[in-house]
Image: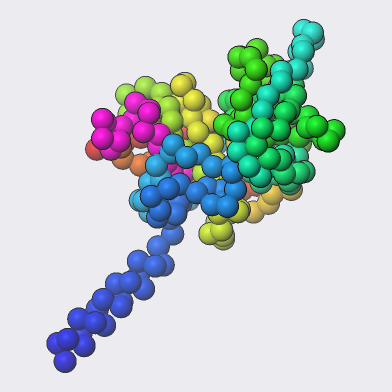
Amino acid sequence: MRKFQKIALLLLTVILFSGCRLISPQSPTPTFPAATEAEIIPTLVPTLQTVEPTRTLPTPTVISRPTATSTPFTPQKAAITVENFKLRKGPGFLFDTVGLYDQKVTLLVYGRSQGNGWFFVSTPDYRYGWMKSDYITLSDEVDKLPVIGYRDDNLISGHVQNAGGEPMDGIGIVIFPANSTKNSDQDNAVTDSLGNFYLFEPKDLSGYYTIGVNAYDCKSKTVDSQCQFLYGYPSAQSLSLPHQSDIAIQFVLPNL
């Protein structure tokens, strides 16, 4: 009888833990938004803490969008560094795919998104669209590319800092529908050296979404020499999309 009770207790524990909602998959290799795509961020370590969204909605903040530059500009030549790389309609993982391209395909890069996460490019088969910048090698410096605003979207930007107000770089941010656990429904961004992140979502997205911290970079100042995260994890937040104005969100990493 005592052996049967131990087995039943073990099964109950497994069932309870399998029902927990995690922002990122429990895997040693981060695979967002999808494990089968080349559009991944391999240097980030996924956090394994359950994060529940807060009940309150963030206060919308007017965000300054970049304007078109009148300075003459020559597109940069560039090459793709991975296979089966996606060209998308907009600068985000949730925009439709326009085409797939193989490694070493030559591109022309006309500009970059805010945060440098995406490049606006043309391909050898005369298509235009956006590609993730992590897997494109430019012929010149990225800062020489003009910042191109994308209007047909909901911009969700924000800032990550510690309790002392210091900006935190290399922090992964994920957004996903509140009623879905599929990686293909997720979008993500990484904070830059100033702690800023930018997510561009299609205007036709609707419903409640959860946004929160889900990963960190071992090269950032948020870890020790053993790549151990030095902070706690802030609560996620709930969003209702679409929104009439751009949204700005701030996350504060609590001290341990």
Q: Is residue 232 above or below residue 27?
A: above
Image height of 142 relative to 234, above or below: above
Q: Residue at x 24, y 78 (%)?
A: 9
Query: Could you say which is closer to the camera, residue 158 or residue 133?
Result: 133
Q: Position of residue 173 (x, y in %)?
A: 49, 39
Residue drawn at x 38%, y 28% is 220
**Which residue of the protein is positioned furthest toward the bottom in this rendering?**
1
Q: Residue at x 68, y 20 (%)?
A: 147
Q: Quadrant of residue 245?
A: top right
The single residue placed furthest to the top in the displayed view is 71
- In this view, the residue farthest toward the front is 104
Q: Is residue 143 left or right of residue 75?
A: left
Front-most of 246 and 187?
Answer: 187
Give the quarter of the figure containing the N terminus.
Answer: bottom left
Q: Residue at x 77, y 7 (%)?
A: 71
Pick the quarter of the image with the C terminus: top left
User: Does 253 sit left or right of 183 as displayed?
Assistant: left
Please state the extent of the stretch shown in magenta in the rendering: 212-228
The answer to whether 140 appears left or right of 256 in the picture is right
Residue 36 % position (x, y): 58, 52
Residue 59 place in picture, x, y as percent: 55, 36
Q: Residue furthest left?
A: 2
Question: Can see residue 57?
Answer: no
The answer to which of 167 and 88 lies nearer the viewer is 88
Any magenta on residue 155?
Answer: no
Q: What type of secondary structure mainly makes up the magenta span?
A: loop
Q: Vertically, is 123 above or below 238?
A: above
Query: Left or right of 229: which side holds 101?
Result: right
Where, by quadrant of the figure, is residue 91 drawn?
top right
- Can you give x and y, in whole percent of width and height, for residue 24 in the image? 45, 51
